[in-house]
Image (cartoon, rainbow, N blue to C red):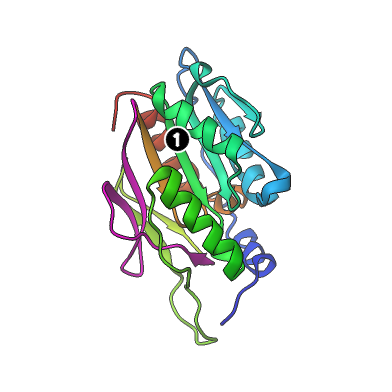
Amino acid sequence: MSITRRQFLGYATGAVTAGLPRLLPLDPTSRRCVLLDWNEHGCFRESVSGYESALTSAGAQWMRADARWMSPSRCAVLIVSAALEIPPPAIRAITSCLQTGASVIIESGAGFATDREFRAHRVVLRDYLQVHIEEPVDLWPDNSSQRIPYVDYTWPRPAKVRDFSRVVPLGRQAGEVIGWVEGLPVAFKRPGGRGNLIFLGSPLGPALWAGDAEARRWLLDCLGAAGGERV
């Protein structure tokens, strides 16, 4: 079954979890988390909003910035939400943060890209960040009633997060796979510069936007681990 981004977000909205427990704030003495947001370069607003909601409800110290932001010394974790086109200023922000010891979480938005957009996205990831990805895979290939796909994360703790969309599987590369869906590797972590690079081929932001409790717990655990020692 072909699924549009609007349909995917409709499914995600239906997954809102009632009774979301109160989440503990991140250490207020730590350097802040920066959410990189550049509207004109294809970020899905729902994904950005999901991260904003999760970080705010957790009491995290965070700020939103566009691709011209260049203050890596103030950043413990940089989140690049629903990335598709990654312009040169964003590449510079990512590499600067890694070099200064921050962790960078890149969430790929290429599952909904056109063929041309996907090819460009793949080249930028490969040439500038040494991240290798495969063609997007539709998790809902037909209209048959099948079980809901879940991403099984193994780090920083085991977690199952719903995914109703298309995912971007990983190619062979250095790093530890930390997320699988339907037998496909879709998330990894590895050292980069003095920091850490975490790549998500399955969008987490829309699940956060829908209020998915497991997604929020996983994000905060990830930020806590990524903001400390090298992972």
**Residue 59 drawn at (x, y percent):** 56, 25
Residue farthest to the right? 40
Q: Nearer the viewer, residue 41 or 214?
A: 41
Can residue 95 be seen in the rendering of this structure? yes
**Mark 1 element type:** strand
Location of residue 172 with respect to 86 vertically, above or below: below
Magenta residues, start to end: 165-194
Magenta span includes 188: yes
| Residue 157 occupies quadrant | top left
Q: Residue at x 31, y 68 (%)?
A: 183
On-image quarter of the C terminus: top left
Residue identified by numbered label 1: 104
Q: Amino acid at mark 1?
A: Val
**Residue 57 drawn at (x, y percent):** 59, 32
**Residue 60 drawn at (x, y percent):** 54, 25
Q: Is residue 150 left or right of residue 56?
A: left
**Residue 150 drawn at (x, y percent):** 42, 63
Q: Residue at x 39, y 36 (%)?
A: 221
